[in-house]
Structure formats: C-alpha cells, structure tokens
Amino acid sequence: MRGELSPPLSLQALAERIGATVRGDSQRTVTRIASLRSADEHSLSLLLRANQREAASSSRAAALLTSAALADSLPPELPLIVSERPHVDFATLAGWVDSLLRPWPGPAIDASARIDPAARLGTGVRIGAFTTIGPRVTIGDGVWLGDGCQIGPDCTIGAGTRLHARVTLVSDVDIGERVLIHSGTVIGADGFGLAPDSGRWRKIAQLGGVVIGDDVEIGANCCIDRGALDDTVIERGCKLDNLIQIGHGARVGEDTAIAACAGVAGSAVIGKRCQIGGASGINGHITVADGTVVSTMTLISHSVHKAGFYSGIFPMMDNAAWEKSAVVVRHLPDLRRRLRALERTVA
C-alpha cells in the first residue's frame, strides 16, 4: 500500500468498522495495509488460506485479519482481527483506508469545462479540467467527472457516479448510481453494423443507446457499443475488467464479472452472476445461462442453457475440418465409455 495513515488506526477501530472481534491488544495501531511478504510492524495483513499460515507466522505484520477457523492455528501472541467473512471485510477496510488517504476533494467546476446551457447538474458535482458536457445531459448529485471527459447529448449520469479522466459517453447513454468508470473507456460508439452490398459494405445506422445499471464498475479502455435498434444493457452490479468489448445490443446480467480482454459480440445475452475469464469470446445472438463460469481464453460459440464450468478452444484450421473435428470432440466422452466397455468384453 502506498501512503501512511495519520493518525494511525487501532485494531479496535478497524474491528468495529466491520463488526469483527480482536484477539490480543485491541489498542495496537496500524498505519497501512500490506501483504504478508511486505508487511512491517505498522501493517495489517490478510490471511485467507491455510497454506499461508507459515508466511503469516513469519510475517512482521502488526496484526492479521483472518477467519476464526484459521485463528486457532496461529501463534497466540499474534494480534488478530477475527472475522466471519475476512475477504469481504478486507474489501470494506481497504475502501475505508483509501477514502482516508485520498479523500473526496469536494464539489467544484473547473473554469476550462464547457457545459451546454441545456444540461442539468445536480448538487455537489465535481467537473474536471477540459471536460465537455453536451445538450440535454442530466448529471445527478455528487457526480465526479475527471479531466477531459466527453459527455455527449442526451446522456444521464446517476448520483454518486465517478468517471475517471478521458471517459467518453458518445450519446444516449444512461448511467446508474454509484458507477465507477476508468480512464479511456468509450460508451455509446457505433456498433459494428454493416450490410454487404455488391461486394462493398453499407453502414447500418445504430439507433439504440446504452444503459448501465447501478453499482457497475467498468475498467480502463473498454468499449461498449450502442445498440443497432435495442439498447445495449449492462445490468446492476456488473464488474468489467480492462480492455473489454461489448457489442451492439448485447445484455450482461446482474452481478456478472468479466475479466480483461474478453469480447462479447452483438445481441449476445449473458445471464446473472456469470464469471467470464480473460480473453474469452462470446458469439453473437446466443444466450448464456445464469451462474455460468467460463475459463480463460474459451470460445462460447453456441448458447449455454445449463449453468456449469466451461472451457476450451480449437487451434485455427480449415473451417470445414474444424466443424468435423468439433463434432468428434463433443462425442469423445461417449466414445471413451464405449471403448472401455468393449475392452472389458474382449478381456
């Protein structure tokens, strides 16, 4: 962790913040949160897994945040904050510490910002240098727009949302409350809509918009295209990593998490609480069931109707050969069972 807390926080104050208990000296103080490896005598560290116990015992950390199950196996002289949900509570404490180290600077509108007279701004808004806000834009209370953001016409940004520097909302983008969008992301650009016309491509106007639900986080340099007809939708609570492409008219269900460099083609529908691994691809016009987990670099080429853990991709080959091979691979488990039964019969 960069930066040090001043004044320091006691273990009792930290435990009270998350509803946990302290084992040992509750008035011991810490000034930073650090890993087990880099912790010093002023640090709080996190212990989640049993295979980290040796590292925890040799760590210089002033105290550990851990579970009751692991607490009993640690040296009794080691101060602990004992939690029923240490990983979740660590996220809470990290957020609190971050707010203390980098507090909200308060409402202000930089003199270089350009705001259309037809835009409506809520109270407590902060708008950075050289940010442009177009006509008929509505910005909620407590919104923070970083330097160089471009907010196009007919966009809405909900209360408590933060856009880091150089985020672009092209037009007709509705952002919910408490959304966090990192630098370089573009939302509402045209989808890849083209019609073949006598050997050339004719552009199809993209007439939809984009809707982002509450409590969504979108990483740096993502692209979320506007819909061709229907809106592209990212539902409440979704978490998108960096460098993700969401195609026109796609829908991503509530609380789904997508790792870096994944691509979702147009009109795909991803269910709720899915986990999509990095560099994965989701074909267009298919559906993925709620709760599906997709491992890294997996191609989802057809609809997934049953939640499960899915993996795999073929190397490039001639398309006709690839299709034949795919059929064979899908039947391999059955062929294996039949072969084993035949071997038992012969034996």
Image: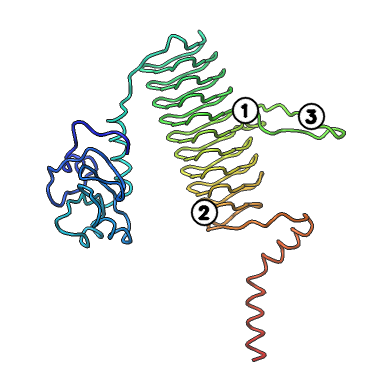
Which residue sits at x=18%, y=39%? 13
Q: How is the image coloured?
A: rainbow
Separation of residues labelled 1 and 2 (CA atoms): 28 Å
Residue type pointed to by label 2: Val
Q: Are marks 1 and 2 in contact (CB under 8 Å)?
A: no
Query: Which residue in the structure is indicated by mark 1?
Result: 189
Which amino acid is tagged 3? Arg
Camera-side residue of 13 and 236? 13
Q: Is residue 344 left or right of residue 318?
A: left
Q: What residue is shown with label 3?
A: 202
User: Which secondary structure, mark 3?
Assistant: strand
Q: The residue under label 1 is which amino acid type? A: Ala
Residues under numbered marks 3 and 1 in contact, where contact means CB atoms less than 8 Å apart = no
Vertical comparison of 180 with 340: above or below: above
The residue carrying pointer 2 sits among few (fewer than 14), some (14 to 19) or many (20 or more) residues within 10 Å by Cα, namely many
The mark total stands at: 3
Decide: few, some or many residues near mark 1? Use Cα within 10 Å; few <14, some 14-19, many ≥20.
many
To which residue does mark 2 refer?
A: 293
x 44%, y 17%: residue: 128
Counting from the top left corner in percent of width and height, residue 296 is at: 55, 52
Secondary structure beneath disc 1? strand
- Across and down, in percent, residue 34 comes to 29, 44
Disc nearer the start of the sequence (3/1)? 1
